[in-house]
Amino acid sequence: MKTLKIAIQKSGRLNEKSVEILKNCGLSFENYKSSLISTVTNFPLEILFLRDDDIPEYVQDGIADLGIVGENVIVETKAEVDYLQKLGFGKCTLKIAVQATSNIQQLEELNGKAIATSYPVILEKFLQEKGIQSDIRTISGSVEIGPGLGLSDAIFDIVSTGGTLKSNGLKPFADVMQSEAVLIGNKSIADNPEVAELLQRIRSVLSAKS
Ligand code: PRT
Ligand code: ZN
């Protein structure tokens, strides 16, 4: 029997809930400490602890068979993987935001404007669909400070409570994408009986919760 591998986030917003759902499936393993791989003692499964950004590609390339990651990261990395199950945590919305004092009203007003983001692929697809041409500035983090410093006219980022936007003098302008954590699989593992067993356990954990 082949030992499956599942990639989950090493640390960050999705780690705790990812570990929790696997434990609730009856799997015994140690959470990430310093080893990047943990062996499940009562199921043919190894857990790989990775940066979330790397998870879709690892699953696409078959280095991991399964993964738990935010939909936003899957779309942004353009990875070709199967979406097996939405997991109900890590919920957020990717939004375009502008300065709270801005009187911008229509999407068309973003034509020619600079938008700072860490998610250029998702943003570009949205703007293209709307026929808008903006100057997308890709930066790796803290995009919220851009407008205040005059670096960009708007930002495109993940929002959950909206507190970060507010404390940086920004307001939401347009919702682009909803996201939550999902279980993804490599394209070639659909018929694997252990995957089917794990998926069934995850689904019963989720339905017991709702
Ligand atoms: O180290 P690694 O690369 O693995 O982690 P990371 O720092 O890239 O990601 P992490 O742990 O911050 O987020 C992992 C995933 O959680 C994201 O890809 C989303 O799918 C999901 N998620 C859910 C969020 C949020 N909610 C969220 N609020 N990711 C980020 N945020 C940020 C947001 O951008 C803002 O800056 O949290 C800040 C607070 O948000 P507010 O609106 O509540 O103020
Ligand atoms: Zn990341």
Image (cartoon, rainbow, N blue to C red):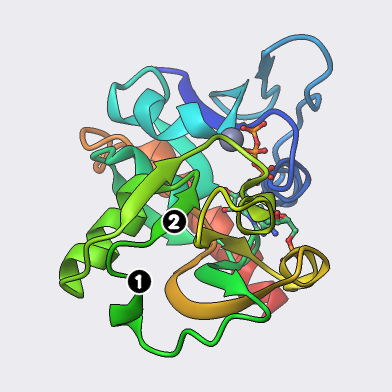
Q: Which residue is drawn at 72% across and 40% down?
A: 15
Mark number for residue 115?
Answer: 2
Q: What element carries label 1?
A: helix
Q: Which of the 4 image quadrants contains residue 40?
A: top right
What is the three-letter code of the residue carrying label 1?
Leu
What is the three-letter code of the residue carrying label 2?
Ile
Q: Can residue 1 be seen in this view?
A: no
Q: Does the residue labelled 2 lie within 8 Å of ligand 1?
A: no
On the image, the x and y values in percent for residue 108 come to 28, 80
- To which residue does mark 1 refer? 110
On the image, the x and y values in percent for residue 173 come to 51, 80
- Of residue 56 and residue 150, the one placed in the foreground of this image is 150
Which mark sits nearer the N-terminus, 1 or 2? 1
Q: Which of the 4 image quadrants contains residue 1?
A: top left
Q: Does the residue labelled 1 lie within 8 Å of ligand 1?
A: no
For residue 163, above or below residue 134? below
* Mark 1–mark 2 CB contact (< 8 Å): yes
Q: How many labels does the image show?
A: 2
Q: Residue at x 83, y 66 (%)?
A: 167
Q: Which quadrant would the C terminus be assigned to in this image?
A: bottom right
